[in-house]
Image (tube, rainbow, N blue to C red):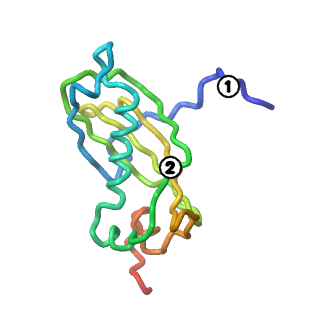
Amino acid sequence: MIKDPASPAPSTPRLTPEHFRFWSLEKLRNADTDQFRHVNNAAIASFMEGGRMELFADPAVSRLMNGLNVVVGRLNIEFHAEIFYPGELSIGSTVTHVGRASFEVLQGVFRDDTCVASAVASCVLLQAGKPHAVPDEIRRHLLGDSSNSAGA
């Protein structure tokens, strides 16, 4: 059965800060607002991009990323509430699945403790423009599995 493209996507369950392992902070700028004085959708997508970069901020992991790039193949954002300038946002990210050369990131944008936007990003690891298998050390880091050490 073909889904009606006008029908809404299934809603993400109510997210709380406890859902996320990686965090970044963003200070809202006047330039992030639109003519209606609320933070525009493009700025929210940029904040989420910054949040995804926190996945690789650990120096041990960034060392492993030498020569590798991450691209987003799909980004599904749900907006739950308007955001107005000024203020700060917290962006939470957690990896929910790692495949051979791809991984999925669940994200939430929070103003105080309220999730104002959420997203699922499907990302692909590339080397020289081609899919590259996710190394075991990076896989463990992304999934939060510290029980296996490198070389075990």
Residue at the (40%, 69%) spot, across then down: 65
Q: Foreground: 17 or 103?
A: 103
Is residue 98 among the parts visible in the rendering? Answer: yes
Percent from the top left, x then y, of residue 114? Answer: 31, 30
Question: In the image, what residue type sits under mark 1?
Answer: Pro
Q: Quadrant of residue 55?
A: bottom left
Residue extending farthest top: 36
- Give residue 37's position: percent from left, percent from top: 28, 16
Residue 45 x %, y %: 40, 37
Going from N to C along the chain, the mark reached first, 1 or 2, is 1
Circle 2 sits on which residue? 72
Give the quarter of the image for residue 35.
Answer: top left
| 132 lies left or right of 137 | right
At label 2, which amino acid type do we have? Answer: Val
Q: Which marked residue is nearer to the observer: mark 1 or mark 2?
A: 2
Badge number at residue 117? none
Residue 79 higher or lower than 75, as above or below: above
Q: Is residue 50 left or right of residue 28?
A: right
Is residue 134 placed above or below 76 in the rendered structure?
below
Image quarter hosting the N terminus:
top right
Q: Disc 1 versus disc 2: distance between alpha carbons?
A: 22 Å
Element on which disc 2 rests: strand
Residue, disc 1: 5
Q: Say which residue appears at 43% left-offset and 27% top-offset.
A: 79
